[in-house]
């Protein structure tokens, strides 16, 4: 089923402009997001063809089947709850049956976690992004050799530097485990190429060092320490960094570079919006979609704040959300039986 099918069969019962335009935070380049609700035809709903969601290729336009919509409302999903409180001028379609559901039927203390908790995860993402922007990783991946060190005098020296000083080739080195010393090895060298040592690694993709069979009469020329834990952490960071580079929104990234504050400013703006909304819901029991502090939020989007100042400000807001949660008169969770009864009533309007 496509969006055209929903419109052609007149299945849409609610449609509104959402996202930045609904929040009053849109700028000249903002996309127009559309969200809505549809009801499956009776034979699809009772049959084997339940379709919970229909969207376009970019997910800028999304419609939720009524049952899926009510389920998400019962879970206090922020994006879905906002649709119920969208300003009238942003609502494009509204069937009278939609008047049976209001935010008051769903609002509960769970909003602390769904609104505030989601904001907290965004702050953690912002910290990770800050780390990526400030510490870009070279595209050439380091190997196990870069994490190997030779014990030298009263300290250590990098393996590559030690090999260069002593004019040695890592391919001719043989390593042997030293009992009771984790990731520490005796180093042997095949001077004339007759001992068939395996070297320290054969492929740049190696995940650990190689061990060799060493004749009993041979004496080690040095001792090597391989920081395997450090190499594992590096590989994880390298993979995450270049996955981020491949998948990042390039326009947003360039904007972040331009304002020079080393954080995703749009992401941070919505983090503060969610924290404000969480506090409002817990204190006042209502959802305010169009934000009254547009200028403040847009100043965050424009990169006018220092990163550390934003993190401190976010922590203060989270403390306020926690305090509002403790004092809130909202129920701990929505009344699922009331939600189910309302859903049944709404379907009966369409199915008879």
Image (cartoon, rainbow, N blue to C red):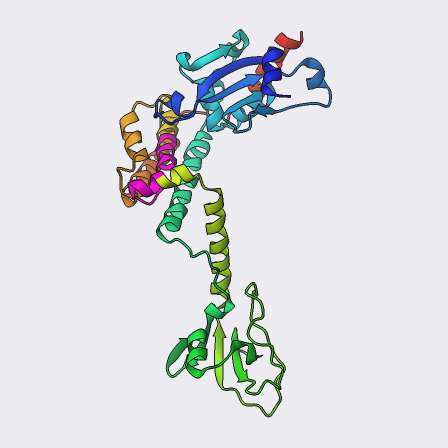
Q: Is residue 194 left or right of residue 225?
A: right
109, 55: nearer the viewer? 55
Quarter occupied by residue 198: bottom right
Quarter of the image for residue 111 reads top left
Q: Is the magenta stretch mostly helix, strand or loop?
A: helix
Q: In the shown orientation, is residue 321 left or right of residue 227?
A: left
Q: As displayed, is residue 98 above or below residue 222?
A: above
At a point 45% along the width and 41% down the height, the residue shown is 248
Q: Which residue lies furthest to the bottom in this view?
A: 217
Depth check: give the residue in front, 47 or 198: 198
Q: Split into 4 quadrants, where in the image is the N terminus?
A: top right
- The answer to whether residue 341 is seen in the rendering is no
Indicate yes or no whether the magenta region holds residue 17: no
**What residue lies at 63% left-to-right and 9% top-to-bottom?**
350
Q: What span is in magenta?
A: 255-274
**Is residue 219 among what the camera can see?**
yes
Residue 181: image x %, image y %? 52, 77
Relative height, residue 103 to residue 187 (above, below): above
Q: Where is residue 226 in the image (x, y as percent from the top left)?
A: 49, 72
Instruction: Tell which of 54 and 178 is nearer to you.
Output: 54
**322 in relation to 161, above or below:** above
Q: In which quarter of the image is residue 135?
A: bottom left
In the visual, does 45 lie left or right of 153? right
Residue 128 in the image: state x and y as whole percent: 41, 47
Kindly identify the residue that appears in the image at 34 percent across and 23 percent down: 291
Quarter that holds the C terminus? top right
Residue at the right extreme? 47
Is residue 269 on the magenta stretch?
yes
Give the image location of residue 109, x and y in percent: 44, 29
Q: How many numbered marks does the figure carry?
A: 0
């Amino acid at each position: 089923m496509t969006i055209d099918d929903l419109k052609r069969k007149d299945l849409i019962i609610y449609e509104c402009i959402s996202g930045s335009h609904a929040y009053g935070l849109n700028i000249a380049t903002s996309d127009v997001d559309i969200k809505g609700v549809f009801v499956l035809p009776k034979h699809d709903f009772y049959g084997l063809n339940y379709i919970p969601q229909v969207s376009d290729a970019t997910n800028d336009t999304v419609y939720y089947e009524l049952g899926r919509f009510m389920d998400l409302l019962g879970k206090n999903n922020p994006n879905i709850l906002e649709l119920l409180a969208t300003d009238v001028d942003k609502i494009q379609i509204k069937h009278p049956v939609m008047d049976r559901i209001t935010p008051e039927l769903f609002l509960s203390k769970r909003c602390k976690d769904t609104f505030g908790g989601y904001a907290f995860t965004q702050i953690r993402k912002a910290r990770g992004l800050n780390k990526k922007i400030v510490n870009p990783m070279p595209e050439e991946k380091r190997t196990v050799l870069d994490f190997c060190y030779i014990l030298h005098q009263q300290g250590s020296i990098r393996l590559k530097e030690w090999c260069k000083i002593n004019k040695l080739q890592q391919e001719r080195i043989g390593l042997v485990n030293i009992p009771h010393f984790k990731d520490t090895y005796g180093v042997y060298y095949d001077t004339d190429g007759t001992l068939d040592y395996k070297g320290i690694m054969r492929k740049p993709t190696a995940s650990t060092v190689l061990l060799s069979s060493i004749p009993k009469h041979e004496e080690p020329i040095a001792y090597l320490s391989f920081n395997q834990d450090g190499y594992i952490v590096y590989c994880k960071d390298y993979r995450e960094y270049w996955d981020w580079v491949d998948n990042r929104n390039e326009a947003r990234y360039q904007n972040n570079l331009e304002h020079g504050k080393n954080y995703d400013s749009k992401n941070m703006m919505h983090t503060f919006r969610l924290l404000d909304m969480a506090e409002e819901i817990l204190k006042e029991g209502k959802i305010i979609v169009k934000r009254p502090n547009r200028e403040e939020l847009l100043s965050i989007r424009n990169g006018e704040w220092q990163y550390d100042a934003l993190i401190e400000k976010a922590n203060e807001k989270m403390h306020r959300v926690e305090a509002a949660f403790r004092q809130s008169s909202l129920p701990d969770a929505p009344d699922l039986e009331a939600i189910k009864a309302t859903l049944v009533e709404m379907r009966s309007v369409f199915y008879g």
